Image (cartoon, helix red, strand yellow):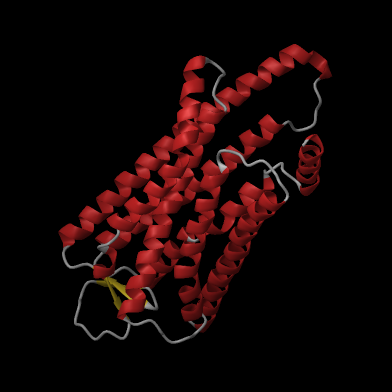
Amino acid sequence: MAIKKLITGMIFLLHTVSGILGNFSLLGHYLYLYFTGCKFKSTDLIIKHLSVANCLVILSKGVPQTMTSLGMKPFLGDIGCKLVFYVHKVGRDVSIGSTCLLSIIQAITISPRNPRWAELKAKAQKYIGPSTILCWMLNLILNVLVPMHVIGNRNDKNITKKTDHGYCYSVSHAKFSGLLYAAQVLFRDTLFVALMLLASSFMVFILYRHKQQVQYIRGTSISSRSSPESRATHSILVLVSTFVSLSTLSSILHICLAVLSSPSMWLVTTSEVIAGIFPAVSPYILMSHDSRVPRRCCAHKRNTDFSA
């Protein structure tokens, strides 16, 4: 049992450390781009909000999970548990919404150049900021009931149906409410995944058609080097496939936790491990496919200063 707890603790520690480093590096990357005069893309604002949401998810759950798994006694009271679960739920939902919004905006950005799409592109650029703020506001409001279903480990209330997370308990006051919550999670996640798959399929089609046109125009003279279009396609496919796979598994496990009266500790731990993977790996996926490097940014800044 001690070895299992140690292994679990090391997994949570790896998630936490890699996730914090990755997301803070991504935010630092954008800070560097700002000070070096690099031009921002329309999707950069969404990615910044996604990184902040990922940091909230990792810090609210990764830190207490790691400390508990490595043998520390529960240190969060009722208020601390309610706050941790609320922040985690808001961060998780904003992360899902931001990823979905990122896919839709990117699909509109690379859409064909015609008057109809040009008008939609202009509107999309204008509503990116309000959409991200609305995403935060909606999730802050919709999750206000989450603290009511969480108690601390030191709480001596006699509640039969509760899920032990190691450092806090999540409770369900009625079977109907648990089923209702599971249905709500399933509907929302399914909707977001469907929108992401639709937007990503459209992007892949547009990029593939563009590549075919370029090959036809250039013929055999086209370079074998990876083009920006192929890098964008690869980034989209990796990010979406990672999100869809992990989100599907996470949703299934969340439904099991909501429906079962006394879920096992193994099921709870597995659910929390899978839920923590996407916030930890997504910044590395995004940074690995960002073609803006310091040399190009500095060159852009010098050219701008010279022309002024």
- 56 is higher (above) or lower (below) than 167: above
- Estimate the x, y position of residue 56 in percent, counting from the top left: 47, 63
Residue 244 visible (yes or no): no
Pick the residue in front: 21 or 215: 21
Residue found at x 51% / y 75%: 66
- Estimate the x, y position of residue 15 in percent, counting from the top left: 56, 65
Q: Give the farthest residue toward the front.
A: 308
Lateral position of residue 182 relative to residue 126, left or right? left
- 204 is higher (above) or lower (below) than 14: above
Pick the residue in front: 81 or 160: 81
Residue found at x 54% / y 48%: 47
Residue 5 visible (yes or no): yes
Residue found at x 25% / y 63%: 145
> How many numbered discs, if any?
0
Pick the residue in front: 137 or 270: 137
On the image, which quarter does residue 173 sit in? bottom left
Lateral position of residue 34 relative to residue 153, left or right? right
On the image, which quarter does residue 40 sit in? top right
Pick the residue in front: 172 or 118: 118
- Estimate the x, y position of residue 9 in percent, counting from the top left: 53, 75
Lateral position of residue 83 relative to residue 239, left or right? left
- 308 is higher (above) or lower (below) than 264: above
- Estimate the x, y position of residue 192 in percent, counting from the top left: 39, 42
